[in-house]
Amino acid sequence: MHRSSQNERVKSVNLLAHLAPERRRVKPSNNVQPSTGIEESRQKMVHDTKKIETGILVDICNSDVAGPDELYDSPALGSPRAAPPPSKPSPVHVPEDIGVGSLVEVATDVDQHYYGVVRWIGVIDDTATAGVELEQSVCGLGDGARGGARLFSCAPGRALFVPLPLCRRDARFRDTPPPDRADLHDAHRSDQPDCPVVPGVVAPLSSLGELAGKNRGIQGHHNSCYLDATLFAMFTFTSVFDALLYRPPEPEDSPHYLEVQRVLREEIVNPLRRHGYVRADRVMKLRTLLERLSDVPGLTSEEKDPEEFLNGLVAQLLRAEPFLKLSSGQEAFCYQLFVEKDEHVSVPSVQQLLEQSFTTSGVKLSEVPAAFIIQMPRFGKQYKLYQKVLPSPLLDVTDLIEGLPRQCTVCGTLARWECAACGGAALEAGALCGTCLRLAHATRPHHKATPLTVCEEFVNILESCPVPRVYMELFAVLCIETSHYVAFVKAGVGTDAPWCFFDSMADRKGERNGYNIPEIVCMEELGAWLSEGAAPERPPPAHARRLLADAYMCFYRSPDVAMYR
């Protein structure tokens, strides 16, 4: 379309000035004036139209409906204008690839693009119209109501109603397809398990059952192992993270929130729980959304770490409440262990490292978390502070929680004081009652103790009864070796529950145009071996050496707390 020069164009910050047209009926005329060059180019932009019947909602993908005789010029940029009627009425063009839920962009005549999601499609003033929820608020826009009727709901300032031809597919998703599409296409071949979309609510698995075997779990593709292993650990056998799947949208959420949540729930988690298999193209859809909507680049093709994936999905797009709240006021989704190496310890446990890290940092948890994700003391994919780390099957967090009653390490009664110098790296050793504190500090004049906060309502009960301990259960461990992530996951609850080993790229069929074969291996003895402290006299189960040498991230849960979150 011919457009005036930059100096002649009048720009406005008001989006409505460029998108809300004065719709005028075009009266038939027998005298057709010769078209100028500009008018001719405008006429070329007039789209073929489908007939529209006033008052009937338009299903863009499936319906052909009839409409009035007037036509409107709907250029790609700028406001629609009345167009001269053609000699023969032609149907109005409705983009067949746009429907409710489509990610679209709307261009204005000031070269400003607005992005959003189509929430409603219908007819307004005899014109096929789309109701778009924009990514960002714009002054002057509404919340989805129009003419006293509620057409859809969104945050104030985000509802934009525009003629449908002004919407086009979001170029951020359209112009750069995921890599190796041919490889993904092969995943649809007849020799691959089916992977249907599963709507609704599907509970996590309570046992391993028949899940073990090849072509089970999540199929890996193009450096996706970091994501495959993390999703398998988070959702297969536990519901501690299920709030991410069902939280209703809030005004502060991205317009793409429901689509991201739907893909995660209905195309990945539900099929995994019901059918035991998720095809790579389903995961690629989520990766593409994360690539475009989060500030973490390279999620569709590059090697990434689980914490980067958690940041993009859980923190940014799903806006989940942080799993950890620290006494310092900080919040986080996972906790990185920072410790100095003890040369006298060859295989430390996660319990020892966690207490040492909390002692060094001087912070505590403000509350018992429903989920506790702990990153091992290793940096990058190669450097490890310890060559082996033993994941503790039960994590005692009693001494890590601020304000939680604690036991005197000497006499076992209710502790009233804490001395970091007396305890050293073990937090439990620093908790003392008043009597034991005086005895301990009689020969240690330089030690300073701080009082512990104890709820006075429970003092009498706690002084006469054993102080309860708070434990969290290990349910998954992510491991990495030579840039490849795998997962050890507990298939159930309790110390007797079996474990399984998951690798999204355990095998491969074909070369460049082939596909990966995921595998789940049952590990009946792993739980008992961990509970015994990985006794050296007992040979470790198959794959267990990787659990000790390659542990990268440990997942703990508190089922009692998760019930209320």
Image (cartoon, rainbow, N blue to C red):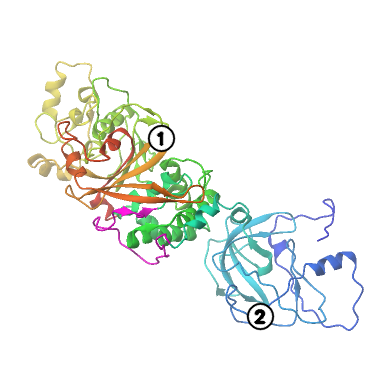
> Residue 181's x, y, as percent?
55, 53
Residue at mark 2 to residue at mark 1: CA–CA distance: 60 Å
Principal secondary structure, stretch drawn in magenta: loop
Q: Name the residue under label 1.
A: 482
Nearer-the-camera pick, 128 or 362: 128
Q: Which of marks 2 and 1 is nearer the N terminus?
A: 2
Secondary structure of the residue carrying tag 1 is loop
**Amino acid on which the number 1 mark rests in the picture:** Thr
Residue at (11%, 28%) from the top-left corner? 410
Rendered-image quadrant of the N terminus: bottom right
Task: List the residue tagged with mark 2.
Answer: 52
The amino acid type of the residue labelled 2 equals Ile
Which residue: 30% across, 33% down?
Answer: 549
Image depth: mark 2 or mark 1 in front? 1
Residue 344 occupies which quadrant of the picture?
top left
Residues drawn in magenta: 191-218
